[in-house]
Amino acid sequence: MLIQPGSKLVMIGDSITDSGRQRPVGEGLFEALGKGYVSIVNGLIGAAIPGDRIRVVNMGISGNTVRDLESRWETDVVGLNPDWLSVMIGINDVWRQFDSPLQAEWHVMIGEYETILDRLCAKTRPSLKGLVLMAPYFIEPNRSDPMRAMMDRYGAVVKKLASKHKAVFVDTQAAFDDVLANMHPVAMAWDRIHPNTVGHAVIARAFLKAVGYVW
C-alpha cells in the first residue's frame, strides 16, 4: 500500500466525510471517526494490516465548501501534521447552485473552486508524504442531468489538480457509476448525496483501491 507504516492520515471534507465524527478532532474510541467511509477505511486497514499502525483522523464538517476548508486549513490540516492527507470537497460548492439558486453568495463557481483547491494543495503538498484528492459526486446515472453534468466538471478540476500536484486521484463518481449499473440511486442515498452504508462502502473501496490496499 502507498500509505507507509506509522503514517498519520488526515481525511478532510464536508458532511460525507464528517458523518457524525467526534469534535474537535475525530480520532479515538468507539465512533470518533463517524459512521461513514472514513470509519470503513480505518477498519479495513486495521483488520488487514494492524502492524502498520496507520493513524486515521477525520476532520470533515457538514456543509463545508472549499472556502470553508481554506478558513480552517491551518488548524485542521497544518496543525495536525499529517503524513498523508485526503481531501474530498466540492459537493456543496455545486449543490448550493441548485438548492439555493437565489443565494449567490453561497455559490462557489468553478474558477474559484479550482483556485482555492490549487492554493491549498500547493501550500501543503511539500510537507506531505502523500496527498489524495477525491472527486465530488452526484449519485445520478443520467449524465445530462444539470447537477450531474456540473459535478462532473468539478470532478475534472480535481483530476487535473491531482496530476499537477502529484497526488493520488480517486474517481468517486466513477465508483458510483459502476454500482448504478445495477442499483437505483435511492437505494444508496435518499437525496443522491448522503449515502447509506452501501454508498459509504463504495467510497471507501474506491479510496483503498487508489492507494493500493490489498485485503
Image: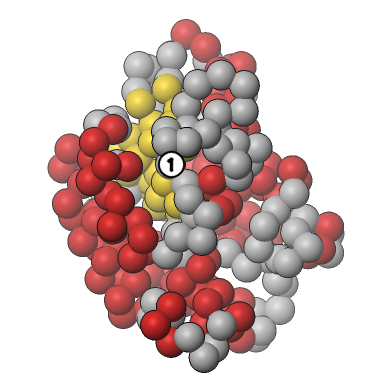
Residue 185 position by quadrant: bottom right
185 sits left or right of 155 in the view:
right
Answer few, some or many: residues within 10 Å of disc 1's Cα (few below 14, many 20 plus, some between 14 and 19): many
**Up-down relation of residue 160 to residue 201 (above or below):** below
> Quick one: quadrant of the N terminus?
top left
**Residue 35 horizontal/vertical position (percent):** 65, 37
**Residue 7 horizontal/vertical position (percent):** 34, 23
Residue beneath the point at 63% across and 55% down: 175
Q: Amino acid at mark 1?
A: Met
Residue beneath the point at 35% across and 26% down: 8
Residue beneath the point at 63% across and 68% down: 138
Q: Is residue 164 visible?
A: no
Residue beneath the point at 77% across and 55% down: 188
Residue carrying label 1: 59
> Quick one: quadrant of the C terminus?
top right
Residue ranking furthest to the front? 23
171 sits left or right of 194 in the view:
left
**Residue 164 horizontal/vertical position (percent):** 25, 59
Residue 37 position by quadrant: top right
**Up-down relation of residue 183 to residue 102 (above or below):** above
Colour basis:
secondary structure
**Up-down relation of residue 182 to residue 113 (above or below):** above
Q: Nearer the viewer, residue 118 or 96?
A: 96
61 sits left or right of 198 in the view:
left
Give SS at disc 1: loop
Residue ranking furthest to the bottom? 102
